[in-house]
């Protein structure tokens, strides 16, 4: 059964808060970049810890899709990691990271829906 790692919601919240914190020129901007990069690492570690998809019949395809989606999210995260530290256009990268946070939140919801459907299948739904 696929599961969302317990650390993922907190890691996403910490990254989102870091992205919204003030970005001032000079040393504060460097500190902001480093903080965001550290929070990205927490999200990455939590995503890597996500359990594999379902092997159960019709849920297997959805579980496989969720696994591929997770890998795509990890890929985007790894591309943005160096960018947040090096890019001169911090705002564009920040906006891209905010989009990624929303996409990971949607992924978490899909995993939770899959878990719910799997439990409902095991227990026998109302239908």
Image (cartoon, helix red, strand yellow):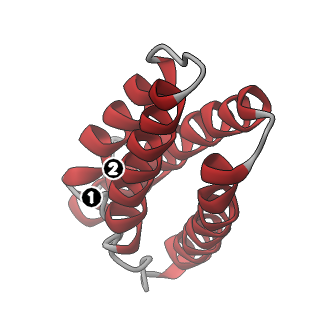
Left or right of 30 in this view: 18: left
Total marks shown come to 2
- The correct choice, above or below, for 119 with respect to 26 in the image is below
Image coordinates of residue 28 in percent, x first then y, are 45, 25
What quarter of the picture does the N terminus occupy?
Answer: bottom left
Left or right of 70 in this view: 44: left
What quarter of the picture does the C terminus occupy?
Answer: top left
| Picture disc at residue 12 | none
- The correct choice, above or below, for 84 with respect to 15 in the image is below
Q: Which residue is mark 1?
A: 119
- The correct choice, above or below, for 103 with respect to 90 in the image is below
Which quadrant of the structure image shows residue 98? Answer: top right
Image coordinates of residue 75 in percent, x first then y, are 66, 69
Q: Nearer the viewer, residue 62 or 101?
A: 101
Image point 26% across, 66% down: which residue?
Answer: 122
Which quadrant of the structure image shows residue 99? Answer: top right
Left or right of 45 in this view: 65: right
Which quadrant of the structure image shows residue 15? Answer: top left
| Picture disc at residue 116 | 2
Image point 55% across, 16% down: which residue?
Answer: 24
Question: Marks 2 and 1: in contact by CB < 8 Å?
Answer: yes
- The correct choice, above or below, for 109 with respect to 94 in the image is below
């Amino acid at each position: 059964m696929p599961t969302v790692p317990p650390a993922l919601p907190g890691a996403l919240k910490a990254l989102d808060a870091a992205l919204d914190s003030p970005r001032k020129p000079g040393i504060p901007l460097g500190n902001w970049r480093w903080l965001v990069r550290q929070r990205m690492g927490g999200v990455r570690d939590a995503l890597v810890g996500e359990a594999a998809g379902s092997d159960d019949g019709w849920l297997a395809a959805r579980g496989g899709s969720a696994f591929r989606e997770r890998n795509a999210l990890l890929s985007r995260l790894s591309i943005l990691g160096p960018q947040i530290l090096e890019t001169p256009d911090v705002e564009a990268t920040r906006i891209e990271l905010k989009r990624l946070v929303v996409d990971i939140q949607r992924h978490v919801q899909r995993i939770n829906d899959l878990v719910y459907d799997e439990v409902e299948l095991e227990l026998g739904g109302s239908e």
